Structure formats: C-alpha cells, structure tokens
Amino acid sequence: MFRMLRVATCAGLLTFSAGFSTTVSAAELDIVASFSIIGDFARNVGGDRVAITTLVGPDGDAHVYEPRPADAAALQRADVILVNGLGFEGFIGRLVEASGAKASVVEVSQGITPLKASEDEHHHEAGGHEGHDHAGHHHHGEFDPHAWQSVRNAEIYVKNIADAFCKADKAGCPIYTANAAAYTARLADLDKEVRDAIGAIPAGRRTIITSHDAFGYFERDYGLRFIAPEGVSTESEASASDVAKLIEQVKEDKASAIFLENITNPRLIEQIATETGLKVGGTLYSDALSGKDGPASTYVDLFRYNIRTLKAAIPAS
C-alpha cells in the first residue's frame, strides 16, 4: 500500500523517505505533479531548482484519467509527488503502488477548510443514474476537491509545496521560501482583482450555469452562484430528469449566463442553452490549464481569463 503524507503548514513536518533521483543534477528535485494547476504552483515555488513532470496535462480531465507506462516511470524517479488530495485523483493510489515509487505523496490541499459535496453528488456516486457503468471508475467522496478555485486556498497550496521542497532539499530552502513569498504576494493581488470584478456585477445577475460542479469554492469566496447538471466529478452523468429539473431551476432563478468548460463535452450545455434561450457565454477553465499558447496557461491567467469571460457574458442590467 502506498503512503500518503499530509504536509503540515507549521513546524514539525513529516519526514520524507530518503533517496534522491539520480536522473537529475544534485541541485534539483525531481517533482511529479498530478495535474497542470499543481504543476504551475510547483514551478513558481521551485524555479530552476526543480524538474517537474505533470501527469494530467493542459486541458486534461483528472476525473477520468488513465495512467500511462511513462507515468509509472516518472513516479519511480521522483523525489516528491504532489497531489491535490480530497479524493480528486482517483488513479493515484494504484499508480503509486504499481510503480513501486519510493517518494512520499504530499497532499497540497492540507490545511484548507473543505466544502462538503452536495447531496446530489452523493446521489450520483450511489449509482442513481441508470445505464452508467461504474466499474473501474472513481468518484469523489464526502468533500468537494476543487479547492484551488479559491485563490486564498491556492496560497495554502503554495505554502505546503514550499514546505515539502524545503524538507526534501534543505540547501534550497531559502530559494523556495523566497519564491513562495513572491508568488503568494501575486496571489493576494489576484484575490483582490477577483473580488473587485465580481463586486461590480449586479446582485441579481450572479447565477450562472456550468458543466460540472467545480466552482463551489469560487462561489463561497466571491459571491457568484453556480449551478451544474453534473456533480463534482465529470464521471457523474446527468440523467434526463436531472436536466429537466435544472432547466426549470434556470427559468425560476433567472440565470444570467451559461458556460462550457475546457475539460467537458459541450453537448449537454448546448442542449440546456437551446431549451432555456440562454446564450453560451464562452469556456471557463476549471480543472486544468490551457496549453502554452492558450489563454489560461498559468493559474493566474486562468483566473483572469475566467473573470473576463464571466463579465463579458453577464448582462450589466
């Protein structure tokens, strides 16, 4: 059984297993990040001192990801493995075990206040939709794992990553600490940008629709209301009755806009848009960054792009 370590954000960190990768220089840590957003955090903290492999890349969906042989090889040579935790990466346990990885697995969401998954999500997970084959699939548990949709949570992620790097590479700790402090200052500015932007949207225009329930932490922190036909996992298929109820809810609540997501199939959202008369307002980035040439190739760019997209689609009056 693989070992999952939770990194504390104060003194008394748990000890990592000994042994450094021989495939990189002594000045580097070999880091594996489970998906692109965590990879970006790690890059900002580690700078040139770390080599980063990201398992689920740009526009990839970690909910349904199937590991490749190259992933096992990356874990075998890793010094630190960074995962979100909260049940997000259903594939990671069996991948670590199958790879024989010696590095500890660090949950970078440790220390955030998790939101409970909705009752509807528990219904999805219980197999409430006929015709959906759950064999071999992963579903989230009690908590919503999309904690990075709060910028203040992202600051906790960054602190946990810096702590993990410092524990694995004491000589580089001053660099990691300084990088983390500089990046956290940028995140604090970003958080204010988001609050100011959402604050300018009229209160009666703050209900929108997205593909799956990935924006609960955004809703809690910034005051937009998100409703979605799927649960917190893209594996939770919406039934015809779910969609019908959502369409009625949209009409009653007078939702202002409807959005696609970069990781989900657009057909369901297009169907809801047609039946409600709402115009699709664009694509939001939820669980993954865009490619390098895309509009959301970093976490900061992701938030700024999403805010611009939201404001452009929501009527001012």
Image: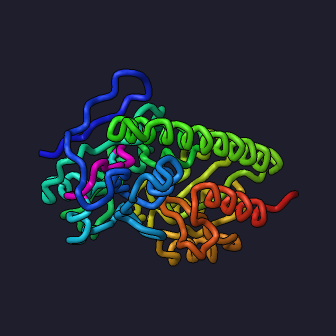
Where is 92 relative to 68, above or below?
above
Q: For residue 292, which quarter of the picture?
A: bottom right
Residue at position x 53%, y 73% in the image: 291
Q: Among all residues in the image, which is located at the extreme top?
A: 11
- Percent of width and height locating residue 86: 36, 43
Residue range of the region highlighted in magenta in the rendering: 75-86
- Position of 66 compared to 274: left or right? left
Q: Nearer the viewer, residue 72 or 315?
A: 72
- Position of 122 compared to 136: left or right? right
Give the quadrant of the N terminus. Answer: top left
Q: Nearer the viewer, residue 47 or 250?
A: 47
Residue at position x 68%, y 43% in the image: 191
Q: Among all residues in the image, which is located at the extreme right?
A: 317
Q: Nearer the viewer, residue 248 or 19?
A: 19
Where is 29 relative to 171, above or below?
below
- Percent of width and height locating residue 107: 35, 42
Q: Nearer the viewer, residue 297 or 254?
A: 297
- Percent of width and height locating residue 257: 70, 64
- Percent of width and height locating residue 140: 34, 50
Residue 250 visible here = no
Residue 28 visible here = yes
Residue at position x 83%, y 48% in the image: 200
Residue at position x 72%, y 43% in the image: 189
- Position of 272 compared to 131: left or right? right
Q: For residue 89, which quarter of the picture?
A: bottom left
